Image: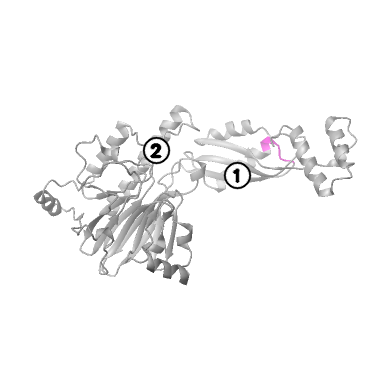
Amino acid sequence: MVRLIHTADLHLDTTFSSRFSKEEAEERRQGLLLAWNKLLDFGAEKRVQAVLIAGDLFDSPVVSRSTMDIFLSSIRKNPEISFFYLRGNHDTKNTFLFQEHLPKNLFLFSHEGKKYRLNEKLVLAGQEFYGRGEQEEENYFFDSEEEEEQALEEGMNCFPEKEEPAQGIWNFKEEDCNLLMLHGMLRESSVSKETSEEKASSERTPEAVQTEDGISLRALSKYPIHYLALGHIHKREEGRFGALRYLYPGCLQGRGFDEEGEKGFYYLEINEQNKEIRTEFVPLKDGEFRIIEVLLSEEDGSLEALEKITERIREENAGEKDSLRIILKGEKSPEGERNLRYLEKQLSENHAYVEIKEECRLKLHKEDFMHEKSLKGEFLRMVSDSESLSEEEKEKIILLGIGLLQGEEL
């Protein structure tokens, strides 16, 4: 049994400058490294043989010295684990340019593709698509065959496959259990069922595995690949195309409300003899971004809203380190404006970050304002007396107009 971890899109060294204060942003930045350390702790506990990083290890080409030192040191401190890093669209070849002595248990890929034999019948291949235009260089981290043999004797049983260049990484053997790492979007057309015309066309002209349009599952399904380890999509996703199984672990930790919800990584147990791969998603709970909807009635003012929001947060089991976006739904009165800033300040005492958005419908009783001597009353009478508008159109215009008079935005 071989045990692996599949992760992607760590985006270490993200600045977090758009939403948080300088101190909060720094805490979030360190939180990404802490999430990486939790992954390593899990790996050590489970005695995994390898960690697959399917792209976007760092957030930008410029990486702080402290983050780089912590990342490389963490790999050196786990010599029993082999780390495989495939560049994504946020990564460059220059990431490790000024690092003279990289850990011997860190393995890279290239645009031509590389393949490693992890065990007697277990092979890992990977091909990079991003970061072109830089000089490619071999980097197996072995200066000689003697050094490679010594590393293997010490237990690092992953090594480059020796293949003819003409065959490339796509010469998979049927008897092997084959894993493939790629970084990118799946093409929409590649997920759907192949028609007879498309099948005939692809047989005449082989389809490229990855282009600017994305990754083709149809092209990959022609190879004996048993697990496709993907990166790039920040939301967890898995599926099948025929016998081909593909998984996106999503980002290791959310960095904004567009990455809300449960985040983590995949743990794999592989029986290479019968090619059985068991997967388990391992969530990392601290510091999630959560979107919570709260239903309010017309009569609910600021204090009643606070009570209902607090109850919903309790039901969702949101933690102190979580960032919350509260969306208010339901109805509101034109006479009672809820103090959203007050609500945010109250809730922020118990959570890392809180923002509240009002999406309640304006509940209007027209008869209460029709005879009122005010701009609001004049507006209602003018729209209600219009003969060119339908009743449905009058209702929409009145709600919009009253909302604008109450200070709402279009």
Please say whether residue 301 is one of the residues in the magenta stretch: yes
- Image quarter of the C terminus: top right
Residue 90 sits in quarter: top left
| Residue 47 in view of the camera | no
Q: What is the span of residues highlighted in magenta in the rendered image?
A: 299-303
Which numbered disc covers residue 311? 1
Question: Relative to the observer, which residue lies in front, 335 or 188?
Answer: 188
| Residue 184, above or below 271 | above
- In this rendering, would 215 be left or right of 158? right
Residue at x-position 12% and y-position 54% = 153
Q: Secondary structure at mark 2?
A: helix
| Residue 64 in view of the camera | yes
| Residue 21, above or below 201 | above
Please say whether residue 335 is one of the residues in the magenta stretch: no
Residue 299 sits in quarter: top right
Residue 94 sits in quarter: top left
Q: Amino acid at mark 1?
A: Glu
